[in-house]
Image (tube, coloured by chain):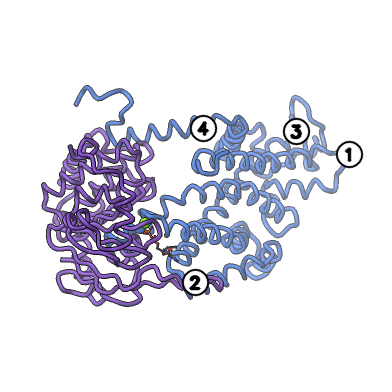
Chain colours: A purple, B blue
């Protein structure tokens, strides 16, 4: 359902410094209910790509299509509907939740913004918020708490509940576990994996860690300095990477040990 | 559900209460801010209930007592009497109402105007920002005293005109503060999240940005309150603000000027009142900063 076609993003250099080409002709596709991994080191342009997909940033060149329609030329009403179908979970759960809003208000907000499509009144929204929090493993006693009262893992669960609130078809996960304690990373990954199975979600799962991708994704793209250097089924990549960068990444990975997998 | 653990807030109201308790605790950590708050409360009581509290309400209303001119402080007249035989304590207490009301009006209006201008400039950006900030800087360069004189000359004297004149030169400070805060908050990830969700501009401004910048606005308002009272008093002192016989601290000070140093009590007590108000609102502002703006905490 998502097609990224030759997207280039150039940030103009400030104060005499040269321009930054964050993305150079990036192409990838995410089919319905498909889980695609995007792996690259820090600074390779992953977040820039998500910002382009969400319409927060305009690509310098190239197109982003959702169900065959270019989001750059979409009428406002259709773009609004599309925004409810594509959701995002951000990397930093400390920065991505408004500190002045309770968990309830944070998770209810997408339903308020898209009330025309969802048609939920205030009461039913509150019921659904409780349901969603339960779904991500937070009890109803957390409903009226503020973000600073939660741990990093709990905050990310709230972020996930917010992304699920409007029944999206595709969720962009921008390194959803990299800012969390190692001890809770596996739990959150498990949760994301379960949710995907349960609701047949499409994932664009971004990470700098191949190990994380391995258990969640059907296909993988490797991005290096703003360019896709390898793309293909996950098994193929792990069986034998074709690119230099892929070999380097796999070489740096600890031996796959099923006992240490987060999805035992 | 009845067995909810003790410290888990069970409703939005309880959660808010818990946050308040925490804030109050931080406030009490600094005894200076408690002193500031106590003096501000005292001033508020004087401003509200003054006419019923003062020993000589008839003097506040303009009555004079030529038989008791320039009496030094005594049990009968704690702050002594002035050239008209009026009780200075009564006048100073009554003056708190004028000073606080005028100060509050100045700060509130300046905060509202400044927040609107600053929020629009910071949020919309580009040429709107450019134009609004040029105008703001222009207003900032006008000296408030001269502006007040010009307004008094053009519109005539009076408290309302004086407040208007001070607000004219006061709002740019708020506009600069709010613009900077809005521009910083606009880049926050939670604002990006709201934008990605399709939230409207008013929603982003009112739900996500403004609630996160009320703290610095309130802190500035409190710190400014003392200076606004001082400005009102200065204008009263030089004779282009509040006019006698309205008992205002600057006016009282101005009238006492001719009788120094012999009848020092006619000047010292209104002067102390001004000093106390400026001092108290500054302490309160600092305390509020600790409570509301934990980032700035040491
Ligand atoms: N707003 C911006 N202005 C200028 N350069 C930017 C901006 N955002 C990102 N970049 C640059 O683009 C490159 C890619 O950044 P990013 O997409 O955040 O990478 P990643 O998410 O993979 O770590 C980096 O070199 C970064 O410095
Ligand atoms: Mg990133």
Q: Is residue B283 left or right of residue A166?
A: right
Residue B217 sits above or below residue B132 on the image: above
Front tag of 3 and 4: 4
What is the crowding at mark 3: few (fewer than 14 residues within 10 Å), some, or many (at least 20)?
many
- How crowded pointer 1 is (Cα within 10 Å; few <14, some 14-19, many 20+) is rated as few
Marks 2 and 1 close (CB-CB < 8 Å): no
Q: Which disc, if any, is residue B26?
A: 4
Could you tell me how far apart the alpha carbons at marks 2 and 1 are, in whole angstroms?
Answer: 71 Å
Residue A70 position (above or below residue B62): below
As measured in the structure, the alpha-carbon distance from the residue carrying label 3 to the one carrying label 2 is: 68 Å
- Residue B89 x %, y %: 70, 35
Say which residue appears at 52% left-offset and 56% top-offset.
Answer: B111
Numbered mark located on residue B262 in the image: 1
Q: Label 4 neighbourhood size at 10 Å, few (<14), some (14-19), many (20+)? A: some
Q: Quadrant of ligand 2?
A: bottom left
Q: CA distance from mark 4 to mark 2?
A: 44 Å
Q: Name the foreground residue: A76 vs A137.
A: A137
User: What is the number of the mark on residue A115?
Assistant: none
Chain under numbered label 4: B
**Residue A13 has which mark?**
2
| Distance CA(mark 3)–CA(mark 4) | 37 Å
Q: Which mark is residue B79?
A: 3
Are the numbered discs 4 and 1 placed on the same chain, yes or no? yes
Find numbered disc 3 in the image and state the secondary structure of the residue it sits on: loop
Dot 1 lies on which element?
Answer: loop
In space, the residues marked 1 and 3 are separated at their CA atoms by 14 Å
**Mark closer to the observer (3, 2):** 2
Q: Are marks 2 and 1 on the same chain?
A: no
Query: Viewer-proximal residue, A234 or B255?
Result: A234
- Give the quarter of the image for residue A118: bottom left
> Which chain letter goes with mark 2?
A
């Amino acid at each position: 359902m998502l097609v990224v076609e030759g997207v280039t993003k150039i940030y103009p250099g400030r104060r005499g410094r040269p321009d930054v080409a964050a993305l150079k002709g990036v192409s990838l596709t995410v089919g319905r209910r498909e889980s695609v991994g995007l792996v690259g080191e820090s600074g390779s342009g992953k977040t820039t790509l998500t910002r382009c997909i969400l319409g927060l940033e305009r690509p310098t060149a190239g197109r982003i299509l959702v169900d065959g329609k270019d989001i750059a030329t979409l009428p406002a009403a259709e773009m609004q509907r599309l925004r409810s179908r594509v959701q995002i979970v951000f990397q930093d759960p400390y920065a991505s939740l408004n500190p002045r809003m309770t968990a309830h208000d944070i998770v209810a907000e997408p339903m308020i913004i898209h009330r025309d499509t969802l048609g939920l009144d205030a009461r039913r929204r509150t019921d659904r918020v409780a349901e969603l929090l339960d779904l991500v493993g937070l009890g109803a006693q957390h409903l009226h708490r503020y973000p600073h009262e939660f741990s990093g893992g709990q905050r990310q669960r709230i972020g996930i509940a917010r992304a699920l609130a409007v029944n999206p078809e595709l969720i962009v996960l921008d390194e959803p576990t990299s800012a969390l304690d190692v001890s809770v990373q596996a739990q959150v990954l498990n949760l994301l994996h379960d949710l995907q199975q349960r609701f047949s979600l499409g994932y664009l799962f971004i990470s700098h860690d191949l190990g994380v991708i391995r258990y969640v994704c059907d296909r993988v793209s490797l991005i290096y300095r703003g360019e896709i250097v390898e793309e293909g089924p996950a098994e193929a990549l792990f069986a034998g990477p074709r690119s230099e960068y892929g070999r380097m990444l796999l070489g740096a990975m600890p031996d796959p040990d099923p006992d240490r997998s987060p999805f035992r | 559900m009845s067995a909810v653990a003790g410290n888990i807030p069970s409703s939005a109201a309880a959660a808010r209460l818990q946050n308040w308790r925490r804030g109050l605790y931080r406030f009490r950590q600094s005894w200076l801010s408690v002193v500031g708050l106590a003096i501000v409360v005292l001033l508020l009581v004087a401003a509200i209930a003054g006419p019923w509290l003062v020993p000589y309400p008839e003097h506040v209303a303009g009555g004079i007592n030529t038989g008791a001119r320039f009496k030094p402080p005594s049990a009968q007249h704690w702050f002594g009497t002035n050239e008209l035989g009026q009780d200075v304590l009564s006048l100073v207490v009554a003056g708190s109402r004028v000073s606080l009301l005028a100060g509050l009006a100045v700060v509130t209006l300046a905060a509202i105007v400044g927040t609107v201008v600053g929020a629009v400039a910071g949020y919309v950006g580009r040429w709107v920002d450019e134009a609004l900030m040029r105008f703001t800087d222009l207003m900032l360069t006008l000296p408030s005293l001269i502006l007040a004189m010009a307004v008094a000359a053009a519109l005539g004297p009076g408290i309302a005109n004086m407040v208007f004149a001070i607000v004219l030169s006061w709002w740019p400070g708020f506009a600069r503060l709010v613009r900077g805060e809005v521009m910083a908050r606009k880049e926050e990830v939670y604002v990006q999240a709201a934008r990605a969700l399709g939230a409207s501009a008013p929603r982003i401004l009112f739900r996500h940005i403004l609630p996160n910048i009320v703290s610095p606005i309130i802190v500035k308002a409190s710190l400014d309150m003392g200076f606004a009272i001082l400005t009102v008093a200065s204008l009263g002192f030089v004779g282009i603000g509040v006019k006698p016989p309205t008992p205002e601290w600057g006016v009282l000070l101005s009238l006492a000027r001719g009788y120094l140093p012999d009848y020092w009590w006619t000047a010292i007590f209104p002067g102390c009142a001004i000093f106390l108000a400026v001092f108290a609102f500054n302490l309160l502002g600092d305390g509020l900063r600790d409570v509301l703006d934990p980032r700035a905490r040491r």
